[in-house]
Image (cartoon, helix red, strand yellow):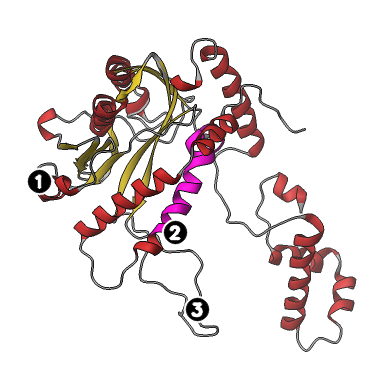
């Protein structure tokens, strides 16, 4: 059992039963003697194996995860990146100047994964609410190593200049620094990266900083890094290359950028509701008001984050250095993935239940409810959770279990 999991092979009760039938047939025949049928015998042994796995060996049923790297490779990458990061930035940057940025999908409907249903009734565990790819918006989250959470850049999927931008954005929450942007794909690209630096990041950085980002091209391209340096006084620190991110898209013209600032929030409409290079530029607009010294921004390897142009935007707008994370290793190297996104998504599911109401709800109402829910969930993430995520993802002195 442990050998299979050590080699990252799938392990389930049925496979354990087949192993017994193949390698311990005599024991199996003796055990099933007296059972009513082979089916009842198999069920009895499977229950025995489940108890054996849980009580004797500390195994638990978990959702299978897919990864492009083995656990050993991930650990090697994690240790190497932590040592290189602190060796390069540790003497020049303090926790108050190290940032991590990442995008995540916010679905309009996030029903609980486990519900009460009548036993034995076919189809009675079905629910009509689901996390549909089309029914979502994107949220660009930024945290700082000292525990601070920056305002959110929301990317709403829609047509710039359309009804969403004209009629809905003015009604979105105001006064907390959040940025809203409408983009056709509803995701990050080089233009969104530039907006991120100009409208968000540069207002958060007041000294030279480092921005840890993934290897998405608009993040770590030469132009993307220049934007971050110019706008936010930050240096982009990308993860190693060979990411699975999309290629860099041509930045949209400013005339196609639809952003609305209400108080400290910024809203933008994007056709796909996701980050692209234009939304990244809008995020930079938010970030620059949060940074008052040179800083480091940690980001994943999404193209518009780590492209040359994307890094330039962060440097120009927010005075921050973009530090890309290693490819295919954000699960262990990115602070947001390590300790923040899990609690955030769990909180979103819990808040969905409190917001739930029966009856027809328009898409416009769902967008507004989802944005308000995300802001509430973000506010509930405490600084200790943020600090702990940085300490676990990029420890100054990593310890490897042998």
Which span is picked out in magenta?
A: 330-351
Real-space CA distance between mark 2 and mark 1, rounded to the nearest whole angstrom: 31 Å
Name the chief secondary structure element in magenta: helix
Q: As rendered, which of 218 and 341 lies closer to the eye?
A: 341
Residue marked by disc 3: 117
Are the residues tagged 2 and 1 within 8 Å (C-beta)?
no
Real-space CA distance between mark 3 and mark 1, rounded to the nearest whole angstrom: 43 Å
Horizontal side of 303 relative to 93 (left or right) equals left
Closest to the camera, between mark 3 and mark 2, is 2
Above/below status of 168 relative to 242 = below
Element marked by disc 3? loop
Q: Is residue 319 magenta?
A: no
Closest to the camera, between mark 2 and mark 1, is 2
Residue at left offset 90%, top offset 72%: 26
Real-space CA distance between mark 3 and mark 2, rounded to the nearest whole angstrom: 19 Å
Q: As rendered, which of 160 and 199 lies closer to the eye?
A: 199
Residue marked by disc 1: 166
Res 226 → quadrant: top left
Horizontal side of 296 relative to 402 (left or right) equals left
Q: Which disc, if any, is residue 350?
A: 2
> Are there few (<14), some (14-19), or many (20+) residues within 10 Å of tag 2?
some
Q: Which disc, if any, is residue 79?
A: none
Are the residues tagged 3 and 1 within 8 Å (C-beta)?
no
Residue at left offset 56%, top offset 50%: 65
Q: Earlier in the sequence, mark 2 or mark 1?
A: 1
Q: Earlier in the sequence, mark 3 or mark 2?
A: 3
Of the 4 image quadrants, the one containing the N terminus is bottom right
């Amino acid at each position: 059992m442990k050998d299979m999991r050590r080699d990252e092979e799938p392990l389930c009760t049925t496979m354990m039963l087949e192993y017994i039938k193949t390698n311990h047939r005599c024991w199996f025949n003796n055990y099933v003697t007296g059972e009513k049928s082979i089916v009842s015998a198999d069920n009895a042994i499977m229950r025995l194996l489940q108890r054996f796995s849980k009580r004797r060996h500390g195994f638990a049923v978990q959702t299978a995860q897919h990864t492009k790297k083995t656990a050993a490779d991930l650990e090697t990458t994690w240790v190497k990146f932590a040592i290189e990061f602190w060796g390069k930035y540790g003497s020049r940057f303090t926790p108050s100047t190290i940032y991590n940025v990442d995008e995540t999908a916010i679905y309009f409907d996030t029903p609980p994964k486990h519900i009460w249903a009548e036993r034995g009734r076919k189809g009675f565990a079905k629910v009509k609410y689901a996390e549909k790819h089309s029914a979502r918006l994107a949220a660009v989250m930024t945290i700082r190593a000292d525990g601070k959470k920056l305002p959110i850049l929301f990317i709403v999927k829609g047509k710039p200049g359309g009804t969403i931008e004209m009629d809905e954005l003015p009604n979105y929450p105001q006064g907390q620094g959040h940025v809203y942007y409408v983009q056709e794909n509803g995701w990050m690209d080089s233009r969104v990266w530039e907006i991120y630096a100009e409208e968000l990041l540069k207002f958060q950085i007041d000294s030279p900083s480092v921005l840890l980002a993934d290897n998405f091209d608009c993040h770590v391209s030469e132009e993307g890094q220049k934007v971050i340096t110019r706008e936010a006084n930050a240096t982009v620190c990308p993860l190693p290359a060979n990411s699975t991110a999309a290629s860099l898209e041509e930045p949209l013209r400013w005339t196609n950028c639809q952003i609305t600032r209400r108080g400290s929030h910024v809203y933008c409409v994007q056709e796909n509701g996701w980050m692209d290079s234009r939304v990244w530029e809008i995020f930079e607009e938010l970030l620059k008001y949060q940074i008052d010294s040179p800083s480091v921004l940690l980001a994943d390897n999404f193209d518009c984050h780590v492209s040359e142009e994307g890094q330039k935007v962060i440097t120009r707008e927010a005075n921050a250095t973009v530090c890309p994370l290693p490819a295919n290793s954000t699960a262990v190297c990115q602070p947001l993935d390590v300790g923040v996104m899990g609690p955030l998504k769990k909180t979103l599911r819990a808040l969905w239940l409190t917001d739930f109401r029966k009856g027809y709800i328009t898409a416009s109402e769902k967008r507004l409810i989802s944005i308000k829910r995300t802001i509430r969930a973000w506010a509930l993430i405490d600084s200790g959770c943020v600090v702990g995520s940085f300490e676990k993802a990029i420890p100054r002195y990593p310890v490897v279990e042998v």
